[in-house]
Image (cartoon, rainbow, N blue to C red):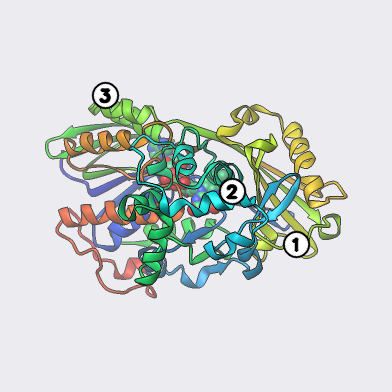
Amino acid sequence: MAVDTDVLVVGGGISGLSTAWMLARAGAHTTLWERESVAGGLIRTDSANGYRMERAASMVMNFRPDVDQFLSEAGLDNLKIRRDALAEENRYVLQRNQLITVPGKLGSVPLSKVWSLRGKLRMALEPFIRKGGHDGETVSEFIRRRLGDELLETAMEPFVAGNLASDPDRANACAVLPRLTALEKRYGSIVKGVIVNKLHNRRTAMVSDSFSFKQGMSTLVKRLSSTLAMAGNARIDHQFTVTGIERQGDNWAVYARSPKGSHSICARHVVLSTPAPAAAELANVIDPVLGDLLAGIDYAPLTLVHLGFDRSSVSHPLDGTGFLTPRGAGLSVTGNLWMSSLFPDRSPADKVLLTSYQGGARLPEAASWGDQRSVDAVLAQIGPLLKIKDAPEHVHIHRHPQALPLYHGNYYNRCTAIEQRLQQLTGLHLQANYLGGVSIRDRLATSRLTADQIIADLGLSAHPGSDANLPAGKVWATNQP
Ligand SMILES: Cc1cc2nc3c(=O)[nH]c(=O)nc-3n(C[C@H](O)[C@H](O)[C@H](O)COP(=O)(O)OP(=O)(O)OC[C@H]3O[C@@H](n4cnc5c(N)ncnc54)[C@H](O)[C@@H]3O)c2cc1C
């Protein structure tokens, strides 16, 4: 079978789209096959009644220059909208039936009302606690060991449940908190590490830029997929469900089904950018051990309940990002984002949009609740906190049966084993949110690594000069195999 394309990317979520974009820009002949009729995967902005609602990521929280560079090269810089300054400052957590602001900086901890004196003293001991831990340590074990139980229950558990739909008692610390665990490994203490990095003016993992895009997060994926569709050396095929993959000499033969029939393609490299269960099915035939490792990655379900209100119906000033809830409060809502405070154009004038995240690993059974039960639970839980007086004028629900991969158990060993299997399968790559972080930032950063590896193998240059202002198809080199 003759080679049809340098690279076949399977799956057009942000992982697959960004990898394909980077490859095509470097001159690789790139084909992307996506199962759905539109690309973007989890990321999609729904619009109704003047409200703009996100199905998954609602913002990018960045501190990486390589991510900035990618967005600028992709011509997305002038489409960014930054998080409102006040919303940036205030992040709330629920405590004793009240919303309290969580300090964003180390220096504000002593005056914060979130922690007791005893809790603060325990945190102050952190630099004096001996280095410890192991690869299988959970987030709870790590935080309890270094910073104490109070910080775990009031801040870290709400963060892990609210942002990752995960459970700190089962989540792997090295996978979920890679920067904090690395600081301990390198400096013996998180606090010491932060201070040393500050003194040396080194890049830290503090988020320096939080943004979305005009018209919502769909703009990001639409921009990448339309650039790929226009490029001379790339193509994107929708409604192509990949059903099989097999070795063919040094290359890979890949098979797909679409409404038009059956398809096959021969590629030098294949990048699997599907969720883990789909990757497991495809990998199973070529390497059952790899298939099993991928099939063992669990996902958490999540329900998003978007509620729109008249501004006058909500007495709380909504002067922040929103709030997270600790497990001790016994709520099904893990977090509530004040979308209309974060970004402009998320709701009509004089209305507000509040998005609640329900379920996750904390309460997976919430995924099977009917719409009325989901909305009733959200209203009963956020209503008293935000002093909501009237019924919502807009309700929109989105359910993800498999929202986010859970970096649970000895995740670190699983990743090492996956990498070892891939070394025997030259030309096959895994690039999706079950490896290397779920955030858009981590997705773009790891796509860069995958793309660079393939680009080097193909003998191309990863940075072929600046062309961000030119129509992509006109400038990208073609490298038809
Ligand atoms: C509710 C929620 C809120 C979030 N909030 C944030 C946030 O605020 N900030 C942030 O940075 N991140 C956030 N995230 C995380 C982020 O949105 C995701 O991790 C990321 O979008 C996943 O991208 P992906 O490309 O890896 O996977 P996906 O988006 O799942 O893409 C996989 C693609 O593969 C396709 N596919 C599957 N099987 C096949 C097949 N056999 N053949 C062809 N195609 C196939 C699918 O159709 C899909 O398009 C959030 C996630 C969720 C669920």
Q: Is residue 474 above or below residue 4?
A: below
Image location of residue 206, percent across then percent down: 46, 62
For numbered disc 3, what is the local secondary structure?
helix
Give the distance between the C-alpha atoms of the residues marked 2 and 1, in whole angstroms.
43 Å
What residue is shown at x 71% (from left), y 29% (from top)?
Answer: 370
Q: How many marks?
A: 3
In the picture of the structure, the residue carrying the numbered disc 3 is 288
What residue is shown at x 48% (from left), y 33% (from top)?
Answer: 299
Three-letter residue code for mark 1: Pro
Image location of residue 383, percent across then percent down: 80, 46
Three-letter residue code for mark 2: Gly
Q: Give the quarter of the image for residue 153.
A: top right
Front one among 292 and 22: 292
Image location of residue 427, percent across then percent down: 20, 43
Q: Which mark is residue 119?
A: 2
Q: Residue furthest left?
A: 249
What residue is shown at x 56% (from left), y 52% (from top)?
Answer: 121
Q: Give the quarter of the image for residue 248.
A: top left
Q: Earlier in the sequence, mark 2 or mark 1?
A: 2
